[in-house]
Each structure stands twice: as structure tokens, then as C-alpha cells.
Amino acid sequence: MKKPRVLLTNDDGINSVGLWAAYEALSDICEVTVVAPASQQSAVGRSISIFEPIRAGMVSMHGISAYAVGGKPTDAVIIGLYALDLKPDLVVSGINIGENLSYESIMTSGTVGAALEAANQGTPAVAFSLQVEDQGDKFDDPRRPSQSFSSAKQVVRDVCSRIFEQGFPQSTDVINVNVPSMIRGGYVVTRLAKKLFRTGVEKRLDPRGRPYFWINGPLLDDAEEGTDFHAIKSGAISITPITLDCTATWAVDDMSRLFSLEK
């Protein structure tokens, strides 16, 4: 029986241990081609390089041939689909170093952004992210995170195996999977929480006395039951179905009344 084909990408860069953990999880159950950004591209969302050329070349990583793309995660997906003509059955993005939870996070996440781009181009996609205990891991060298990926690898393999065997869920464009740093429960199908961080801005002065700013803020403590954030805080594996259609259909009647009135 022919193995399914997977395009594997990420936003932490082609050197990330999370990317290669996902490769190890999938390589014996499907044909995996790695097409990933050449450098760290976290928090770039779905931005696409349309004002500059994109360079992509084959490299050898851990004895495996892969494509390093000088651009964003979305660029890597588009290069894989159209320049390399891979025709994957599924795009897998991750394993991201750090959770991608809530409206706030998925709108900026390069991991989820790559999956959304794949879905927009007609290929179903799954994004995988691993919770980190130390938030500093998100900003350190992705080749040497302190986190273990052993449990996350099992989740990647199991989730993708279920999709290959049973098909991708209808009315879903992307499946966003978040794995707790320590799994204490099973799968929970969730909705997105509203926020992940308590946003703040820190003002500092450079050596010449001129101000500059850092956007920062700690994680919130929790979110309401049924959300992805709450599931992760409870030690469960969060599975969130995401759609590309951002239309607020429940607002159509109110909008129609608003714009049907004569001024």
C-alpha cells in the first residue's frame, strides 16, 4: 500500500529539534519531505514574501535531504506546493517550541500560519505545538531546548495516523494540536480561548538616552472550561478545529439592519 505524502514545515527554522522530532514520528508511516525556513521565523503569522525573491536550496540535516527556504513559513509551504510540486496529502507544521493557544496566538503564530496557508491552497493541515515550562525556551536556540519531545512525538504520530485512516474532518481547514509539557489526560476537542498573554510594553533607554520599547507580558493564569488554554492547563491534549472563514455569520442580521437605514 502506498504511503501518504506529508510536507513538513515549521516556524522555528530548519535546525529546530521540534521539526526533526516530528520527522522521526512520521517518517516510517508516510513519505515526508521537509521544507522549512532557513532561520527562526516565530510570530510572523501568515506574512508572505512578495517584495523580494525567495531562495530555496537542498541541505542535509541529520543525514536527511531537506529544503531550506530563505523566507517565512508560508513561503516554505508555497515553495513546497508549487515550486517543488510535492502534492502532499497532508501538511504538518511543527512541533513548535511553545504553545499556540487562543485567538491571540494563532493570529500571529508562524506555525499555525503555515498550516492556514496550506489549507488556503487546498491541502489539509495540522499544526503541532508543545507547551514549555520556561517561556525563555521560545527565544533560545531551537537546536537545544530544555524540553523533551518524546510525548509530543507520540501525539504527532497518533493524530496523523488517525487522519490517514479515517480522513480529515469535514468543515475543518486546520487542526491545531497543543501538547502539555506533562500529559495528564487524553484528547479534548476545544475552542479557542480569547487571550494567552497579559500584554504589556516596557520602555527602556538606549546608551544615547533615546527610548525604545519591548512588547512583553506574562501568561494568563487560565481560561474558561472548554477552551484550548484550559485543556493545556489541565494536562490534556488540546485539539481545536479551525476554519479559514472568518465571517461573523451571527452578526449578519445586525449588520444588515445597520446598513439598511437611510441617513
Image: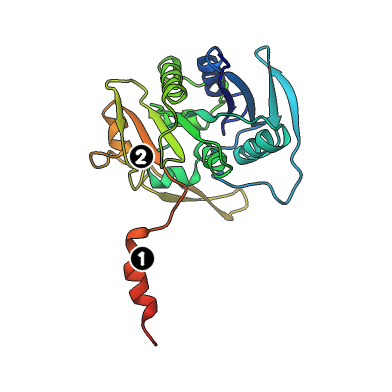
Task: Name the one closer to the observer, 81 or 197.
Answer: 81
Residue that protrudes farthest toward the bottom in the picture: 263
Q: Is 77 placed left or right of 168 in the picture?
A: right
Q: In the rendered structure, which amino acid carries the disc numbered 2?
A: Leu
State the image coordinates of residue 251 (x, y, percent, origin top left). 34, 63
**Where 84 falls versus 245 (above or below)?**
above
Disc sitting over residue 252 in the figure: 1
Of the pair 190 and 233, the residue shown nearer to us: 190
Question: Going 54% across and 12% down the picture, which residue do you hit?
Answer: 28
Question: Where does label 2 land, which residue?
Answer: 219
**Residue 80, horizontal then vertical, whole percent:** 66, 33
Which residue is depicted at the point 41% across and 25% down? 166
- Residue occupying the point 41% across, 47% down: 104
Q: Bin the neighbour count of mark 2 within 10 Å (Cα to Cα): few under 14, some 14-19, many 20 and up.
A: few
Q: Find residue 15 and report its image quarter.
A: top right
Task: Report helix, strand or loop for mark 1.
Answer: helix
Q: Does residue 149 appear to the left or right of 64 in the view shown?
A: left
Towards the viewer: 15 or 157? 157
Mark 2 residue element: loop
Residue 107, above or below 163: below
